[in-house]
Amino acid sequence: MSKVYAIHEAKTQLSKLVKKAEEGQTVYLGAYGRPTAILTKLPEAPKIKIGIYADKYKDVKWDDSLISSDEDIVKDFEDSLNRDDCLL
């Protein structure tokens, strides 16, 4: 077993001890060298699926090539005005 941190020492070094726990170490807290509590990393929370398509698109990556500039949008609009099937 590793070192048992006294409560006062744990209070003054809490951020350091939490960092140790995040790295996977178990930190023992107690008094007079006897552990009474542990500080450890929490297990990963399960992913919650919301909606019927939640698992269908989980690996979709953003594609910057799909972004149109304002100039492209204006050109597309103006070109649509010149088409024969335009309703304007």
Image (tube, rainbow, N blue to C red):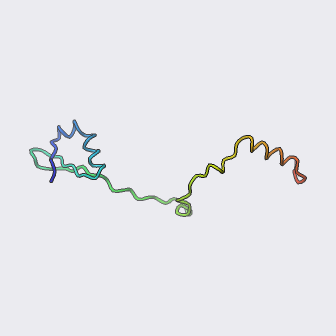
Q: Quadrant of the N terminus?
A: bottom left
Above or below, comparing residue 53 to residue 85 in the picture: below
Give the side of residue 3 with respect to residue 59, left or right.
left
Q: Residue at x 25, y 40 (%)?
A: 14
Question: Hey, which residue is sitting farthest right in the picture?
Answer: 84
Query: Is residue 51 found left or right of 68 in the rendered image?
Result: left
The one nearer the camera, 2 or 42, is 2
Residue 18 appears at what percent x and percent y? 28, 44
Q: What residue appears at the point 12 percent right and 44 percent down from the top-left corner? A: 31
Residue displayed at 53% across by 59% down = 59
> Does residue 67 appear left or right of residue 61 in this picture?
right
Measuring from the top left, give residue 35's x and y in whole percent: 14, 50
Tell me the quarter of the picture where residue 13 sits. top left
Q: Position of residue 16 (x, y in %)?
A: 26, 41
Point out residue 3 in the picture as x, y percentages from the top left corner.
15, 47
| Vertical arrangement, residue 77 with respect to residue 60, above or below | above
Q: Residue furthest top?
A: 12
Q: Residue at x 27, y 49 (%)?
A: 21
Count of labels in the image: 0
The residue at the far left in this view is 32
